Image (cartoon, rainbow, N blue to C red):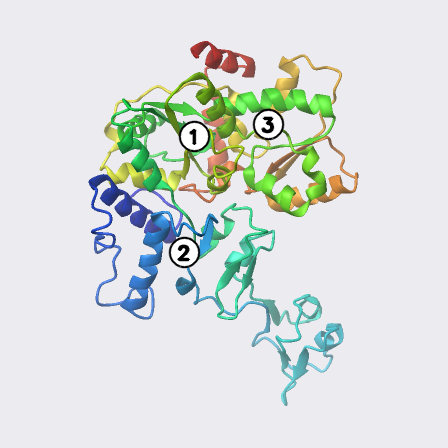
Amino acid sequence: MRKFDTKVQVLKYKVLREVARHAWDGTLLDHVLDIPKDIVPGKVPTMRCCVYKERAILSERVKLAMGGAHDQPDIIQVIDIACDDCPASGYDVTDSCRGCLAHRCEDACRKGAISFDHNHTAHIDKTKCVECGQCAKVCPYSAIVNRKRPCQNACKIKAISISEDDAAQIDHEKCISCGACVYQCPFGAIQDKSFILNVIDMIKGSENNTKYKMIALVAPAIGSQLTYAKLGQVIAGIKALGFAEVMEAALGADMVAWHEAKELAEKGKLTSSCCPAFVSYIQNEFPKLTPYISHNLSPQATLAKFLKEHEENVKIVFIGPCTAKKAEVQLDAVKPYVDAAITFEELQALLDSRDLDITALEEAPLDHASYFGRIFARSGGLRDAVEEALKEQEITDFELKPVACDGIEECRMALLKLNRNALDGNFVEGMACVGGCIGGAGCLTHGDKNKAEVDKYGKQATEQTIASAISRLEEKY
């Protein structure tokens, strides 16, 4: 088994792998739940109250692995039947309450939600409580705690609430498809829809790349993933799946940095367009700031657009760490250029569905982006790339004052200041995931080590400047 952070990821991977395996064989509709015993519950429940519930949940996981319901376009979805084992959310009084006489909690509550029993133990009326947290702040014993669910803790934009049936529910008007809740849910009750079947259909339909050419764009975060093999072996594995060519999306990052630097100098103030979740957040929560969003497409879309303008009969699949990229592909501005997006989790499932041992493959070459294009994968990388692009273009009459936002909470603070014209900066690099793309929900692994791996990957680039990377790409076409 490949290395994943959690057993929930392993379960998700197994379902994706087996769905893909049946899709390759053309037996998916006949054997949709003909999955090995290490996934299908046996006679004794291992995760839930009964095997019947386990099988019902598995059925929902399989549906999402197959693309989910067509009438539900939202990428992040809740499996209601799997979301029932978290404690009720909100503020609760614990056994640490000593029944003190001060009753500071009662005095702090402006809604009259706190009462006391005959032992002077405090109780909270949930129908009155507005979860302001003032009672918890003043309790001398820290006896009042906020039992916020992991998904709610993960969702910093407050798009998740709890339904009357105690299941999580997503406000899709607010959701930015970042997938933070997907990664943090301990029961795997929130998942992102998969498009691996679309990718398999495209590969099979290409008839060994004779009908049309399959091109995979791999995100620069690849440098921190699938590290059990060499990068060249990962590329060889992707080609073995049926792709004629594998290219670095970091080349698109080079192009974006080049044009974004020029746009910034012309406009004087800008927010980045590379992270689709960050762009969605601005559009949803700060609509007045939309004129500041860079007019550049994201790196994946920029490179895909270039390729489709210079080559006929190609299908392009983006492979990366991002669930929000799946939503981006559905946008009218991106749909003509990127045919599908999958995550690194799904890539691992695809490789194993074909029983490909990539560690045994001969390394395949990869078109090289610059160091600056590759470090887009981590927080601060875009800032450094834009600074470099300004230098290379000799734009000396503009002083860059970047604000690199690591995670959506930092993005929010910067946007609030920008909205009030109080931001000490003129370029906002917004990354919805903490750490940047290397913290994306579709990564196999997360953590500080990934940043070092991306920097190492960047330093291996043969192109030393952004201009040389772009020139090499243009010469090729």
First in residue order: circle 2 vs circle 1: 2
Q: Secondary structure at mark 1?
A: helix
In front: 328, or 272?
328
Residue 458 in view, yes or no: no
**What residue is shown with label 1?**
223
Q: In the displayed image of the protein, which residue is found farthest to the top?
A: 475
How would you rate the neighbour count of disc 2 (Cα within 10 Å): few for under 14, some for 14-19, many for 20 or more?
many
**What residue is shown with label 3?**
296
First in residue order: circle 3 vs circle 2: 2
* 8, above or below 373, in the image: below
Q: In the displayed image of the protein, which residue is found farthest to the right?
A: 421
Mark number displayed over residue 172 = none
Residue 252 percent location from the top left of the image: 51, 24
Amino acid bearing label 2 = Gly
Q: In the displayed image of the protein, which residue is found farthest to the bottom?
A: 118
Residue 433 in view, yes or no: yes
Amino acid bearing label 1 = Gly
Residue 468 percent location from the top left of the image: 52, 12
- Point out the frontmost of discs 2 and 1: 2
Image quadrant where residue 392 sits: top right
| Label 1, label 3: how far apart the Cα atoms are | 24 Å
Residue 465 percent location from the top left of the image: 54, 15
Point 43% across, 34% down: residue: 224
Point 70% across, 74% down: residue: 105
Point 25% across, 52% down: residue: 32
Q: Quadrant of the C terminus?
A: top left
Residue 461 percent location from the top left of the image: 46, 19
**What residue is shown with label 2?**
188
Amino acid bearing label 3 = Asn
* 326, above or below 8, in the image: above
